[in-house]
Amino acid sequence: MQYSAGMLDHEARMTAFGERVRAARKEQSWSRRELAERTGISERFLADVEQGKANPSLLRLFELADALGASPQELLRDPQPAGLYAAGDRDRVLALVGLRGAGKSSLGPMLATRLGRDFVELDEEIEKRTGLELTEIFELHGEAWFRRQELECLDALLAEGRPIVLAVGGGLPTSAETWSILRARARTIWLRARPEDHWLRVAAQGDTRPMSNDPRAFDHLSAILNERERFYGQAEFEVDTSARKVSEVFGHVLGLLERRT
């Protein structure tokens, strides 16, 4: 489904608002039930608010703000690109990690536009650097050679010092040196999804390669994801994208970044 700019902004704002309410509640060490008792708002409605699914009335907005010790303006403010990153070189790069189908190519450009920076896919940079497509690199030179190119290409990007949103290949975290450098010099976000989601999203893009000539392709994908989760789990942020619209994930990520500044 395609989203208009207006629809995207509305959903992203609702999601970011919900993230702020949830964060403020947790800062008070309150359960959702406790917040419901303090505001007179039902737990069910509060759950929908925190998930970005409910649009509270002005009265309920003031009740929430009063209970949480925040102003309505603070809860409602638009996510702003300026000021999200101000802590040094590490903040110049926002890196998205995860298997194919996690949502990196969909979410990345949206984040880059909102944050006022370029979107870069590391695999594409490797192809430009080598003059070869990824399949040719693996066929002609093997994985070890590809990993060296990946490391050198990442080093070159980081040396530029320009603010970017970076999507990296699903196997990068398995390379200890490259993964260590990325985590040390960038904000990393693991876009987590179930094997079924990875599978269906890749198929929806018209790419049938994962299914071709391999009756156990889904089992293999599940095994790879299970094996790599221990690496992905080292990312600074983790966002579950399963059964969520890209606009919801977008708002969630912006909320996470705001709370870490």
Image (cartoon, rainbow, N blue to C red):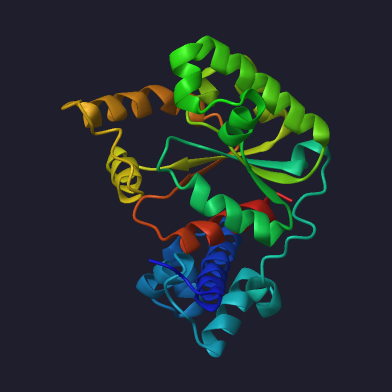
Front residue of 124 and 30: 124
Q: Which residue: 82% across, 43% down?
A: 87
Q: Is residue 35 above or below residue 138?
A: below
Quadrant for the N terminus, please: bottom left
Q: Which residue: 50% across, 76% down?
A: 7
> Is residue 142 among the parts visible in the rendering?
no
Q: Position of residue 179 (x, y in %)?
A: 61, 23
Front residue of 86 and 132: 132
> Is residue 177 among the parts visible in the rendering?
yes
* Total count of labels: 0
Q: Position of residue 185 (x, y in %)?
A: 73, 31
Extreme-left residue of the structure: 215
Q: Which residue: 51% across, 11% down?
A: 141
Q: Which residue: 43% across, 68% down?
A: 2
Q: Is residue 152 above or below residue 195?
A: above
Q: Position of residue 156 (x, y in %)?
A: 75, 27
